[in-house]
Amino acid sequence: MAIQTNTGTDIKEAFIRAFAPEAPNGQPIAPAVKESAAAALQALQFPHKKNEAWKYTPVQPLVSKAYIPAEATEPEDISPFLIPELEADVLVYINGKFSSAHSQIQHNKQLCIESLRQLSSQGKAVVEAHFGKLLNKDDIFAALNTAYAKDGTLVYVPKGTVAAAPIHIIQLTLPGQAACSLQHRNLFVVEPLAEAKVVESFYSLSTVPSLRNAGTEIFVGENAGLEYVKLQLEQHTASQIDHTEVSQARHSRFSIFTITLNGDTVRNDLQIHLDGTETETHLMGIYLLSGKQHVDNYTQILHKQPHCYSNELYKGIVADQATAAFSGKIHVFQQAQKTNAFQSNRNILLSKSANAYTRPQLEIYADDVKCSHGATTGKLEEDAMFYLRSRGIPEKQARKMLIHAFAGEVVEQISLEAVRTYLESLIASRYE
Amino acid sequence: MLKIDQLHAAIEGKEILKGFSLEVKPGEVHAIMGPNGSGKSTLASVLAGKEDYEVTSGSVSFNGKDLLEMEPDQRAGEGLFLAFQYPVEIPGVSMVNFLRTAVNAVREYRGQEPLSAGAFLKLMKEKKHMVDLDSDLTKRSVNEGFSGGEKKRNEIFQMAMLDPKLVILDETDSGLDIDALRIVADAVNKLRNEERSFIVITHYQRLLDYIVPDHVHVLHQGKIVKSGGKELALELEEKGYDWLKEGALGV
């Protein structure tokens, strides 16, 4: 099927129209915020290649495709997309729209877990208080999401509540007739002393291109904890632009795992504000790329308060003609003394035409801090391969052991055993 | 058991082995000594099947099979074991997982049943004791954070686990203090029998006080320039290699 492209000055207008078939007003969630984002959108432009933040990812090919909004359809069976052995509250979205028929929320009675389209009065109050307060307003994709995303997940964990089970959000893209556009918006609010774990997995069954513009806002309250695992497992036709922005209050703990095993062009914008003292943050990522995949992880961590700890580790294996980009900005504000911030990006290139770009950016304005960053890019260790094989281990098995070990450093930090096992099997099957 | 005939091998176009020949019979211990750059480690790497080396001519037969045609893992299956001069650290691969995979891969190659978890642990305990290896080390990643001596003892431990027919010790004594040297030598001596052969590559005669060889060969410029009994090692220790070099050049 030939995919239409838009040209000329109407690209932006056509693009917005594809993501915003309805006016922002008249929607149930935060209409004032949405209208102001829609107004701001008028003045915003697509990032240019000269824009440092988008240096490694060309925007034009992504935004000039003629998309039409994905239609809502229903699959018969969502069981292939469940994670085995994961006892969770499951929310299923099909082409961006909540499917109550396939969702099951039964474990977490004390939490408020809802589709943004079907908010309770409590949910509405949470949304009014938090929606659009965090997500970058100067970014065209984030503004587009704020203005026009119609559905997504609210997770509200009340003060002092520990979630009884993890929450699993399944985002499923089903085949359409033409290149399709999708949006969703998440809002996770974890009140003081509360704890929760969220897994969000993305699948696509579509053979035509799709572009998902995703937005997630996360508020982690005082001495609260949240673990968020994002599994990007879509087809090679599916592209995604994701904005995730997090605010951490004092003494809070937050871990995010961004795992990209599939997809076409994937851009993950992650920004974390350390707004309180003595916070702990883990930013972890794995990407296994092949074909012509292009994955760009653009991360920023803003140390605004003293005594905060952040640890960032992104690891990737890049094969064929795939490209991986990683940017890690650590900004330590003047008053953020006693900051501990560590960052590492490690890449293995499996072919000569595979590419990995890595760019650490440290901006440190405090004088009593411990910050480090490191990056390596190399081949799968030939010496290690030879060592294993010299002990009788066949080549394929040795390669698998090394890849498992490489990814393992990130995988083993996921606290949910079922997710770890699932991920390990996905990674292993990738190199059969 | 092993017959190396007129072996020539090169790395990055540079010829290192220039007509190396050696025959090792079952149960024999051969020491190969020689100055730096004489080709000792190249010999070890070529025999184990390291891809960086190109064999330009000559042949190696191992138990009647063409060794040079085999993949490194097949060579291990056939019973060849190389104790590395520089054992490789492999973060994220646990010693236990590594050893179990290796032992069972080799057993499968030899047509034996895989070891049960219990039998494997028992074997590991027994062999670990033999090289006095700290129990904690087998819980760690392969060689990661091991001291120099621990790495070398770990090689001998792996040798004991894999039940090889021919062992090549590539400068296993380098960097070992006398206590560690004794442990390594004791373990090797315990494994010496009428079937199993050893090629001991070393820079120092001292190792040969503990592992007494049947034959000593001097390697220079890629081939053996002198062979003799264990007394040759003492002679080398006394006189160094210079006199041999001159002799070799004069041939």
Image (cartoon, helix red, strand yellow):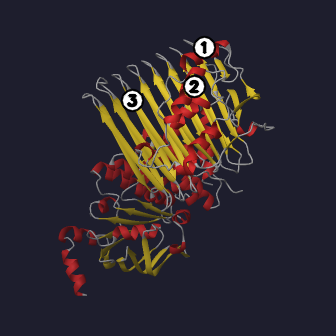
Say which mark, if any, is on residue A125.
1
Tell me where residue B243 appears, x and y as whole percent. Answer: 19, 77
Q: Secondary structure at mark 3?
A: strand
- Which callout, 3 or 1, points to the residue nearer the camera? 1
Q: Is residue A128 above or below residue A89?
A: above
Mark 2, secondary structure of its residue:
helix
Tell me the subunit letter for badge 2.
A
Of A89 and A414, which appears nearest the observer?
Answer: A89
Q: CA distance from mark 3 to mark 1?
A: 28 Å
Query: Label 1 amino acid?
Result: Ala
Badge 2 amino acid = Glu
* Above/below status of A159 relative to B128: above
- Residue B66: where, in percent of width, then height? 54, 76
Mark 3 residue type: Leu
Residue B196 location in percent, x, y? 48, 64
Which residue position is annotated with label 2?
A: A35
**Contact (CB < 8 A) between labels 1 and 2?**
no
Gap between marks 2 and 3, in whole Å? 28 Å
The C terminus of chain A is located in which quarter? Answer: bottom right
Which chain is indicated by disc 1? Answer: A
Residue that badge 3 annotates: A302
Q: Residue at the location (39% across, 50% down)?
A: A376
Residues flagged by tags 3 and 1 on a common chain:
yes
**Who's the residue at 62% across and 31% down the image?**
A149
Tell which circle, 3 or 1, labels the residue nearer the N-terminal end.
1
Q: Is residue B184 left or right of residue A413?
A: left
Residue density around tag 2, few if under 14, some if 14–19, many if 20 or more, within 10 Å: some
